[in-house]
Amino acid sequence: MRRILVGIKRVIDYNVRVRVRPDGTGVVTEGVKMSANPFDSIALEEALRLKERGEADEVLAVSVGPIESQQQLRDALAMGADRAILVKSDTALEPLAVARVLLELVKRESPRLVILGKQAIDDDCSQTGQMLAALWDRPQATFASKLEIQGDAARVTREIDAGLETIEVDLPAVVTTDLRLNEPRYIKLPDIMKAKKKPLDVVELATLAVDVAPVLKVARYEAPPQRQKGIMVKDAAELVSALKQRGLAS
């Protein structure tokens, strides 16, 4: 079966202002709106479009996280994914650990293509897709702004510092999506109702026998320094004078 596996991560909604806990041990999540990572929604939308064009037979949404991540997977099913798998983890995992978990799912599901968001908006690591491709020993195409399937290969236009680059990779492969690839569709009420009947399997992390031990230690979380109040200047000369006083110009 021509299957596409899409990663979905539960994160604090991008419209919510993130607040650091008073003791510096993390960020406040209690009572905070949570959503699917926006780049992952783009990845799912692209997978659905590929299926609608006849380039895939099934779209599988997967997530690694707490049991509450079922909500984001249900949203993915409502968007159009055929089924979903949640690998339940009560602790946050580092990108390498997530890549190892995804590799186990890849071995089980044998997808033709894996599409992930280029990064998650909570940690901005931008590592999981690359690590999965390395562990899987398959090609990767990151920061995709256009994706075309051509037989047993994928033609990907990717965003780089100098502009755009178009590459071709053999399938199976890992593709990570950039912001301009597409605009995810809205979820309609009838689709939400249909999603309740679609299969969503929950797998305990321990059953996968994957090494998820952290390799990094976070010492403390701190909010960025408060921005200083600006001043109004009458003309360019006064601006230069103010910059000199602050040691920002000579």
Image (cartoon, grey):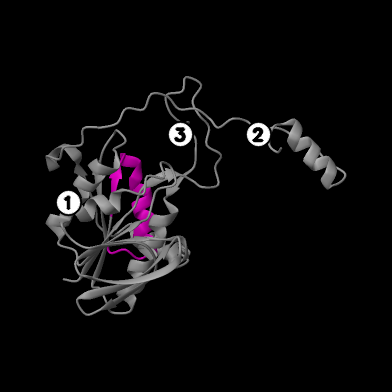
- Where does the N terminus fall, quadrant-wise? bottom left
Residue furthest to the front: 250
Residue drawn at (21%, 32%) of the image: 213
- Residue located beneath label 3 in the image: 29
The amino acid on which the numbered mark 2 sits, given as a three-letter code, is Arg
User: How far from the left and from the top, in percent, is residue 59?
Assistant: 27, 65
Q: Residues within 10 Å of mark 2 (few under 14, many from 20)?
A: few
Mark 3 residue element: loop
Q: Residue 174 lies in what quarter of the image?
A: bottom left
Q: Which residue in the protein does label 1 denote?
A: 135
Element assignment for label 2: loop
Query: Label 1 crowding class (10 Å Cα cut-off): few <14, some 14-19, many 20+?
Result: some
Measured as percent of width and height from the top left, residue 92 is found at 32, 36
Q: Position of residue 26 (x, y in %)?
A: 43, 28
Q: Is residue 156 above or below residue 39?
A: below
Q: Quadrant of residue 160?
A: bottom left
> Residue placed at 45% from the left, 27% from the top?
221
Q: Main secondary structure of the magenta part?
A: helix
Q: Is residue 230 visible?
A: no
Quarter of the image holding residue 233? top right
Label whose residue precedes the other's in the sequence (2 or 1): 1
> In the image as oriented, which residue stretches furthest toward the top?
23
Task: Indicate which disc residue 124 carries.
Answer: none
- Residue type at mark 1 is Leu
| Residue 238 location (% of width, % of height) | 84, 40
